[in-house]
Amino acid sequence: MGQLVQMISRLLFKPKRPKPQREPAAVPPGTVVWAVGDIHGRLDLLNPLLDHLMEDLRASAAGRKVIVFLGDYIDRGPDSKGVLDRLVEVAADTAVEARFIRGNHEERMMAFLEDSTVGPSWCEYGGVEALESYGLHPPAMKHVAQAWGHVAADLDHRLPKSHRHLLENLEPAVSIGGYFFTHAGARPGVPLDAQSERDLMWIRGSFLDDAGAFEKVVVHGHTPARDVHRDHRRIGVDTGVYKWNMLSAVRLEGEAVSFAQSLIGDGGDILVRRREAPALAAA
Ligand SMILES: [Mn+2]
């Protein structure tokens, strides 16, 4: 009987373990990472931002210098082809480790090459501009499946090998230290290494509106906001470049977080500005 009482009281009055204090996220020592948000064919804003990032990395003493591109390189803006040309250049630059995440727009374009019936829906979400950057147009008769087939065949023919190689080798996510880089976000309640590629590319509200933290801080794009976002669970750097003319990137080194943004100034000229991230409120 005494034993039973002891057991029950142990269960009832089990001393609560102190909640482990969550360490601030960090990248490993000797590493610096830049992550670039959705570009959407805006080569005009990508060029000055990348020039700044490459200069910053050249000046850094870090042994590992990474640029993660968070996806959605193409569609909507005027120069998808030019953006992919520049990304191919960065991929070939041995001074940096360039990583390329798959966005839902790259996924749609590749799907169109496989199955031209995807064309009408792709073109509703910016595919027209991507086609035009390769000198192509959607068919005049949008309801004729065969016409879409010709456009897909033409794109297949015009797509440079280097673009195809880049697009076929995109990654769903990249993990570095305490950070998890992916296009859209992650599904709450699912471990980061068990996420579906669909969620990583497409998720919005159920990720953004949840309060629970993941094992790592999620760095993402996909859902445009008027400015960059940072809290204990995520860093969002999609600043709606195709409508608000601002392309954003985040710099991570140790526990330090800062941002770079290329934007169109009051005089109509493009400028790049750097901003430190404000300190996080205590969790
Ligand atoms: Mn997206």
Image (cartoon, rainbow, N blue to C red):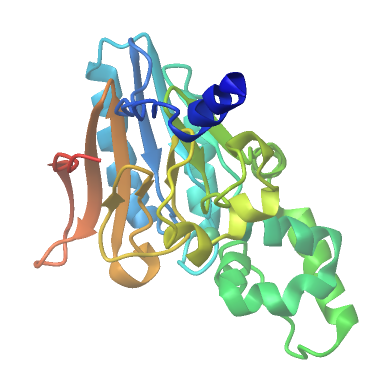
Exactly how many numbered labels are in the figure?
Answer: 0
Q: Is residue 228 left or right of residue 182?
A: left
Residue 53: image location, x then y, percent:
29, 33
Q: Is residue 45 left or right of residue 84?
A: left
Relative depth, front residue between 248 and 173: 173
Residue 279: image location, x then y, percent:
14, 39
If the image is split into quadrants, where does the N terminus sit?
top right
Residue 275: image location, x then y, percent:
14, 43
Q: Residue at x 58, y 48 (%)?
A: 189
Q: Is residue 63 left or right of residue 128?
A: left
Q: Residue furthest front?
A: 1
- When asked about the image quadrant of residue 178, the answer is top left
Q: Is residue 13 left or right of residue 29?
A: right
Q: Is residue 180 above or below residue 116?
A: above
Q: Is residue 41 visible?
A: no
- When asked about the image quadrant of residue 254, the answer is top left
Q: Residue at x 19, y 41 (%)?
A: 280
Q: Residue furthest right?
A: 146
Q: Residue furthest left?
A: 267
Q: Is residue 214 above or below residue 207?
A: above
Q: Is residue 27 above or below residue 122?
A: above
Q: Residue at x 60, y 38 (%)?
A: 191
Relative depth, front residue between 192 and 273: 192
Q: Is residue 51 visible?
A: yes
If the image is split into quadrants, where does the C terminus sit?
top left
Relative depth, front residue between 231 and 172: 231
- When asked about the image quadrant of residue 124, the answer is bottom right
Residue 122: image location, x then y, percent:
67, 72
